[in-house]
Amino acid sequence: MNNPTTSSTTPKLTAAAPISAHVPGGDMQPAQDAIDYFELGHFGAHLHRSSDQGKTWTEVAAPKYPEGATLPDRMPQADGSPLMKPAALKEIWSLETGGKENCTLWCGTIPGGLFRSDDAGESWQLVESLWNREERMKWFGGGKDDPGIHSIAVDPNDPQHVIVAISCGGAWKTHDGGASWTCCSTGLRAEYMPPEEAYNPVIQDPHRLVACPADFNHLWIQHHNPTFPIWTEPGTDPGTECSPFYWSSPPRV
């Protein structure tokens, strides 16, 4: 297992296993004490932090769902209504820094909760503005029993602008640091759903979302579907088959 790579200038999601992130020195620590984060899940979801470029590690608090938080069970009740179950952290699926000059961290989890820390991981808060959206009742697991937030993109020029992708729950954006959210996956198609639900933006199954580093207005999504039409490329025949990738023009974000 390799240690996380580090950088003295730019926060980034590194390739260490299975989830890691690097936060440069900011208000809470000098640049030489930049903090790395490393997630291990063999005995549950745990976070470890290093301030010496990976030489030593200290376990820090992992996100925790508040008491009373619930989500729909995989199987509904006999009458078709959702059977609710307690929400508990199963996996930390994504971890991203919130900007160059702050100690904000965003954490995507299974079963579908987004968490935020503004003190470099000392404490975490569930982003209830997204969790409490009524559309979440339609989210479901894609390969997992429960939905999960696997991708978090933070605008390098505006850390209040964040986009997350959920399997299966589509893509969601905020322009106010998570105070409010808008679904931004209109145009994606889920061929695994009944025809009348295929274009429902809140049940799409993106597998990965990334933003162009030079222009955050341009996004790419790898979708579950094996083949499908390109959704926004100018001049493209809507019936043209292509690889399982979507790309977004600026109006989408």
Image (tube, grey):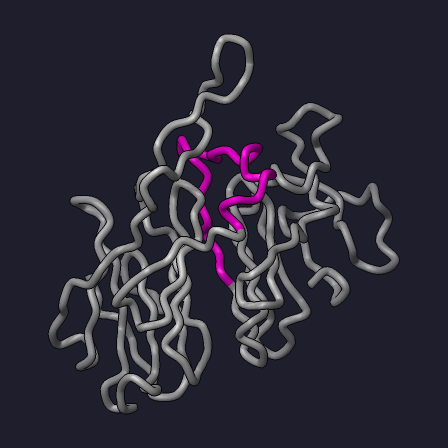
Corner quadrant of residue 122: bottom left
Q: Quadrant of the C terminus?
A: bottom right
Q: Please, is residue 175 above or below residue 132 in the view?
A: below
Whether the magenta-drawn stretch holds residue 184 is answered as no
Corner quadrant of residue 216: bottom right
Whether residue 224 appears in this view of the structure is no
Of 126 and 148, nearer the camera is 126
Residue at the image position 76 percent from the left and 50 percent from the top: 231
Of 235 and 150, nearer the camera is 150
Looking at the image, residue 45 sits to the left or right of residue 187; the answer is left
Q: Please, is residue 224 above or below residue 39 in the view?
A: above
Give coordinates of residue 226: x percent, y percent: 61, 39
Q: Which residues are magenta?
A: 130-152
Q: How many marks?
A: 0
Looking at the image, residue 169 sits to the left or right of residue 194; the answer is left
Q: Residue furthest front?
A: 68
Give coordinates of residue 215: x percent, y percent: 65, 76
Give coordinates of residue 199: x percent, y percent: 72, 37
Give coordinates of residue 91: x percent, y percent: 32, 46
Q: Please, is residue 81 above or below residue 245 in the view?
A: above
Whether the magenta-drawn stretch holds residue 137 is answered as yes
Of 228 and 69, nearer the camera is 69
Q: Residue furthest top?
A: 78
Whether residue 44 appears in this view of the structure is yes
Residue at the image position 55 percent from the left and 57 percent from the top: 209
